[in-house]
Every structure is written in structure tokens, then in C-alpha cells.
Amino acid sequence: MGYKTGGCKWLLAGGIAISMVVFFFLYSFLSFTSSNEPSIRLNSPDETANYFFSRLFATTGDVRYPEELLSATDQFLHPRSMLGVNGYVVPVSFVGMPYLYGSVAKLFGVNVLLFITPLLAIFIPFLFYLFLRSMFSLRVAGIAALLLAIHPAYWYFANRAMMHNVLFFGLLAAAFAALTRIRGPLYTAGRIVGKRVALVFVGASLLGASLTVRVSEIVWVIPLLLLIALFFWRKNPWWAVFIFIFGFAAPLTLAFISNARLYGNPASFGYHGYEVFSFTPTLDAIDAASAAVRAEDYSSLGNAVDELYYGFAPLWKYLLPFGYDPEIFSAHFTEYFAKLFQWLVLPIALGTLLLIRKGLFHIVTVKDHRLVVYVICSSLIFFWMTAYYGSWVVQDNITNIPTIGNSYVRYWLLLYALALPGVATLFVWAYDRARWFGLQRLALVGALAAVTIYSFDATFLRSNDSLVAIAASIRDSQQKFITVRALTEEDAVIVSQRSDKNFFPERRVMESVEDFGETPLVRAMLDKGVPVYYYGLWEQDDAAYISKRYFSPYGFGLEFRASVAGNEYLYRVIPALIPDS
């Protein structure tokens, strides 16, 4: 029996190891495509920026670079997802990813950058398992972790190697895996339990690090921690709070210091409007209301309430930056949660009901609140994140058809994961009640195989945002870059509406805005002797009209240089011989 048990363990370990290798390559599909020489192209401006600044930090120790033409172009000479600030180009994002990935690349070389996320992605389900194991049975936790590994949203964004979302989720899973491993008080029998104290510090530090990757999630992470503290931290000494706060604050403090250096304000992340935020009006409003209460000047109390309302109003752009519209966010949730992965909706609903019933049974029989706490916390996170991101109307593709590559899917990656224990609970419930002799395991394996096939189809093949379609787009971008690089000078600037990711960083780029509002800046670059090109969809007749309508008042026009990709064209900006008025 011992031999058989040992053999089964080795067989299981071998199967897991082989699966990890297979999934690493599946998660790296786009990374291998993007890393083809002679150019590394990525599919979005956010990914391009994260890769560029991670590489920059690895090679120079900085996450900004000087651009001498910024002053002449009103700080506008930069790709999308970047920003010009005081002569430097900086990220428009959260700085945690460039620092973390850049640090890894310092040790192992910049060639690893596109493979860090796929590598993390094969370990995150194990961390998710450890977290769930503190509340659920081995079978439920194991099946939920396996479902995470093959979930289309997770599979897809594990391939989007320079997006924040899988990294954020991984750090969050690691943090809660550490915190939920704390079994018992930190101080017992007259001594400090060092292992438990270390887990508090490690978990808090990982949680803080996750927020440096996506600081916007702090609006629900902090309330969640306070809620959990009410249930689990009552028996711990007061000094444990300071250990947790210190670990939690350390990485965030570094991020805020970096923000102050990059943007001039520790509370800024480069996004429009955030850099001008100040707590002064809020503090003044609190002070005015307090003074009215202390003075018992109840006649002015109404004014004090009004001041409080307007004083706290700026905070709403952090708490709900996209507003609050139940009709909009419910429609988005329906499209991107219920319909996009509709095969999971019924299992989630039935499994969650089973989970609630089991949690209530545990409360009554063994005074165990953990399952109910999980359901409550998950429900609150569901509502908040649905309202937070769902109220934002974003169009990621021209057709506006819901696809797996849409921003809502990556923003709600955590929600998909939190729903999986319900699905796993249903699987286990059905397995235990199956009456087919010897077919239970076959049925379970068959169900998981069907889910895997469906996920592969949804991730790799189904839409114009599928991984196969993106890989083709990346190869097209690489060819466009090779063609344009041969036709332009090294110090050239290429102006385009959405093609900056094709040419940066080998060529400087500028975004073309509505009605060619950048034309005064183009004139300024020409005056400095900088070669400027336009890249767009206009045929030569259209380019002639654009030159006459928009450019001739500034003394320049467009000269055709090449057809780059069928209906995409490159034009050189040249001085107009006879400017039209």
C-alpha cells in the first residue's frame, strides 16, 4: 500500500510538472511572437509603455528619459500611455510594474521581460489554492485553482505579458495566501511566535506591493482588510497592527516617493486631473464644520454641512472616477461576465447557493464563519468593482463588439477568480452524489476537458481579439516598422493617430489629435530642422486635401513616400512652396 501511495504521489507530481511546462508555453504564445527580432512590438500602448520603462529601469536605473523637443512641443512629443513632464517622458500608469520587472531584468537580462508574467501565471493557481485551502476542502480548493489556470480571461491576460492585471492578482493571491496561513495568535504562552509574525509582515508587504501595481484598487482593498480584521484579528496584540502597517506601507511609500519625482505630486499617477488633486479643501471643510459644532453656532451648521459636501466632492474621482450609473454597469456586467462566459453562469449560481448553505451549516454546527465571510467579502468586491469599472464607457475596438480582449475583462479578472470556488463546490457536490459505478472520475475529467477545449477556443480562435489574431497583428506591426525604419531618419518624428506602438522607441512619435490640432507643434519641430512624417490611412488625393485644409496655413504640406501596408501610407512633411490662405 505504501509503495502504491508513493507511486501515485510521484505520478501526480510528474503530471503537475509536465502541465506547468505546457502551460508556460501556452501562456507565452504572444511573448514568443512579440520577441521576434529585429523589433519587439506589443499590441497596445499600455503594454508598450510598461515594456519600455521596465527595460529602461533595468538598463539605466530610471523610469523616465529626457526629450529635448518637449519644450518646443508643449510637452506633447511622446507615445500614448506616456506623458511629458518638465522635459522628461514618464509613464502614465502605476509605477510598480516597471520597478518590479525592471529589477528582475537587472538580474537576468532584458530578454526575460516578456516571460515574467507567463512564468508567474503558472504559479499563481498554487497561491490561489493555498488561499482557498484556509476556507475550503482540498477538493474544492484544488478544482477552483485548476479552473483558474484554464479560465479564458486568465489564460488570455497571462499572454498579455506587460499588462498589470495578472501581476496584481498574483501579488494579491500571494498576500492572502500568507495571511491566511497564520493559524493562532501571534503571542501565546508568554512568547512571540516568530513564524506567524513573519507571515504578517510578508503578507502585508505583498499586499502593499500589489497596490503599487494598481493603486486604484486601494478603494476596496482597505475596506476589505478592515472587515476581515473584525473577524480574525481580535485575539492578536496591538503591536501586530504596527507590524502590518509597516509592511503594508513600505512599498507604497516608495511608490509615492517615485510619483513625487516623476509627476511633482505623490498622489499623482500621470492620469489627467489626478496630478492637481489636493486634500486642502477637504481638511478646510472638516475644520469649518468642527468649529461650528464647538461654538454651538447651529445657525451656520447648514453651511458647514454644505462645506463638507463640497469639500469631500474631490474624493469621488478616486472612489468612483467614472461616476456611478447602475444601468450602464449592469449592462456591462451582463455583457462581459454573464454572456461572454455564459457556460459558467449557471454553475456559479448553483454552486454559490450550495456554498451559502454549507457556510450557514458550519456557523450553526461548528461556529465556523469562514465560508460566510468569503461569500460576504466576495459579494462586496463584486458590487464595488462592477460599479467602479462598469460605469466607465470604454471602446477598445472599432466594432465595439464584446470580446475577451476588452478592458472590462482584465479589470474583472479577480471577479472571475472569486466565483470559481462556487463552481468547484458544484463539481464536488455532483461528484459525491453520482451513482455511476467507476464513472465519477471519468465524468469529472470529461467536464474539465470540455472546459479546457472551450477556453482554448475562446482564447486563441474565437474573435478578432483572440491570441491568434493578435499574433498576426504583431507580425504586421513588425513588418510596418521594418519598412518605415528604412524610409525615415533616426532622429525623425512620426505623427499618427493610433500607430505609435509600431514605431516607438526606434523613432520618436506624436499622437495626431482631432482636426490636426498638433500642427503648430509640427511647425515648431520643422523650425528646429527635425524630419517629420505622417502615417495614416489617407490616399494621395486625401493627403492633398489635408495639406491644403489644415497644413498650408502653417507653411507645410505632405509629400507621398510609400504605401506601407495596403491602405496605410507614409508622408514626409515638407515646406509648402506657396502657402494657401
Image: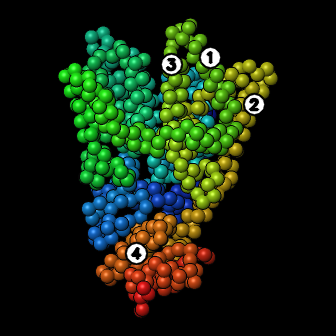
Q: Residue placed farthest to the top in the image?
A: 365
Q: Are marks 4 and 2 in contact (CB under 8 Å)?
A: no
Distance between the Cα atoms at labels 1 and 4? 65 Å
Ranked by sequence position, the earlier of labels 4 and 3 is: 3
Using the numbered discs, state the Cα–Cα distance from disc 4 to disc 2 in whole angstroms. 65 Å
**The label number, if any, that marks residue 519 in the structure image:** 4
Crowd band around label 3 with a 10 angstrom C-alpha radius: few (<14), some (14–19), many (20+): some
The foreground one among 337 and 370 is 337
Q: Which residue is mark 1?
A: 357
Image vertical order of residue 113 relative to residue 549, above or below: above
Residue 217 rendering spot, x and y as whole percentages: 42, 39
Q: Which mark is residue 443?
A: 2
Task: Identify which amino acid the numbered label 3 is placed on.
Answer: Arg
Dot 4 or dot 2, earlier in sequence: 2
Tell me the mark number nearer the camera, choosing from 2 and 1.
Answer: 1
Q: In the displayed structure, would residue 231 be above or below residue 207?
A: above
